[in-house]
C-alpha cells in the first residue's frame, strides 16, 4: 500500500499503534489497496463519507458498500467482516455471566452497542436469580409498537431459559432517551405478564446518545 505525501497507515500502525490512526487510516489498513483511479486512503475516506461517518459502518449493508465506486465484492466483504469482528469483541460474551446490579450496569453494558443505531432495537436480557445475564434476545427492530413487542414473544424465550427475571432495553435513534407514551404502555404490559408468570421485570431502559432513562426510576412501571 503506497500513500504519497505522508507516512503510510501501515507504517504508522507499526510504529505508533492502532490508536494513533484516524478512522480512514484504519480502514485503509483493512482494505490494503485502492482502485485504478484512487489510492487506498482516499477510497477509505470516501467509504466513511458515503455511509455517514464511521458509525455508519455498523448498519451499512454489503450491497450498499458495493455501490460505492472502487468497492467491489472483496472489499465490501472485508469491511463487513472487520465491523462484525469488532462488534463481537466489544460485546462481552454472555458466558461471562455479567451481573446487573443497577440500571447503570445495564446501560453501560449496552450503551455503545445501541447509541448509534439508526433504527430502534428492543433487547431483552434474561437473568438468573443473582441477576446475572444468561441470555439475550433482540425482540424487534423498528419503531416500538405494542403489537410487535408482545409479552408472548418477550417471555417465550425467558421461560425456555428458566430466567428468574428480565430487563428490557431499547434505543431512541434521535439520541433523546425521554420515554414515549408507547414505551410506558409496553412496559406496563410486560410487568403485568411477568407477575402472572413469576418472572420479574426489573427495568426498562431507554438509551440515547450517551445518556439513558430508567423507567423504574421514573416510577413508570406500575
Image (cartoon, rainbow, N blue to C red):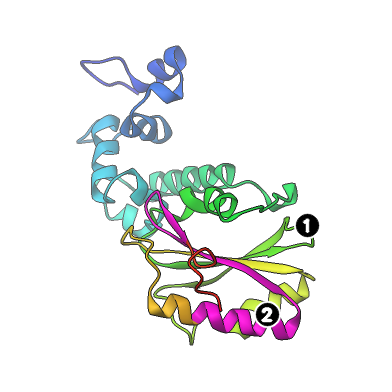
Residue 68: image location, x then y, percent: 26, 51
Disc with the residue nearer the chain's start (1 vs 2): 1
Residue 42: image location, x then y, percent: 23, 33
Asked whether residue 35 is in view, the answer is no
Query: In the image, which residues are magenta?
Result: 186-213
C-alpha separation, residue under disc 1 versus residue under disc 2:
17 Å
Q: Which residue is more in the foreground, 192 or 154?
A: 192
- The residue depicted at 55 percent of the width and 43 percent of the height is 90
Question: Left or right: where does residue 209 sit relative to residue 114?
Answer: left
12 is higher (above) or lower (below) than 118: above
Inspect the magenta stretch and tell me whether residue 209 lies in it: yes
50 is higher (above) or lower (below) than 150: above
Looking at this rendering, what residue extends furthest in the front direction?
Answer: 219
Question: Left or right: where does residue 159 sit relative to residue 33?
Answer: right
Residue of label 2: 194
Inspect the magenta stretch and tell me whether residue 99 lies in it: no
Q: How many marks?
A: 2
Classify the position of the N terminus by image quarter: top left
Residue 192: image location, x then y, percent: 63, 84
Name the element at disc 2.
helix
**Quarter where residue 134 is shown:** bottom right
Residue of label 1: 130
Amino acid at each position: 500500500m503506497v500513500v504519497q505525501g505522508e507516512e503510510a497507515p501501515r507504517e504508522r500502525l507499526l510504529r505508533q499503534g492502532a490508536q494513533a490512526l484516524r478512522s480512514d487510516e484504519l480502514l485503509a489498513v483493512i482494505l490494503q489497496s485502492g482502485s485504478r483511479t484512487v489510492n487506498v486512503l482516499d477510497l477509505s475516506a470516501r467509504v466513511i463519507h458515503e455511509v455517514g461517518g464511521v458509525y455508519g459502518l455498523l448498519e451499512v449493508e454489503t450491497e450498499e458498500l458495493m455501490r460505492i465506486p472502487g468497492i467491489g465484492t472483496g472489499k465490501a466483504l472485508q469491511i463487513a467482516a472487520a465491523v462484525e469482528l469488532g462488534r463481537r469483541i466489544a460485546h462481552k460474551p454472555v458466558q461471562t455471566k455479567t451481573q446487573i446490579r443497577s440500571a447503570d450496569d445495564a446501560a453501560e453494558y449496552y450503551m455503545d452497542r445501541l447509541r448509534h443505531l439508526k433504527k430502534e432495537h428492543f433487547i431483552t436480557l434474561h437473568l438468573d436469580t443473582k441477576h446475572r445475564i444468561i441470555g439475550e434476545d433482540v425482540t424487534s427492530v423498528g419503531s416500538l409498537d405494542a403489537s410487535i413487542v408482545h409479552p408472548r414473544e418477550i417471555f417465550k424465550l425467558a421461560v425456555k431459559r428458566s430466567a428468574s427475571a428480565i430487563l428490557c432495553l431499547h434505543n431512541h435513534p434521535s439520541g433523546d432517551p425521554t420515554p414515549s407514551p408507547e414505551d410506558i404502555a409496553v412496559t406496563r404490559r410486560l410487568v403485568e405478564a411477568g407477575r402472572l408468570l413469576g418472572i420479574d421485570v426489573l427495568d426498562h431502559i431507554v438509551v440515547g446518545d450517551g445518556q439513558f432513562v430508567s423507567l423504574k426510576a421514573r416510577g413508570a412501571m406500575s
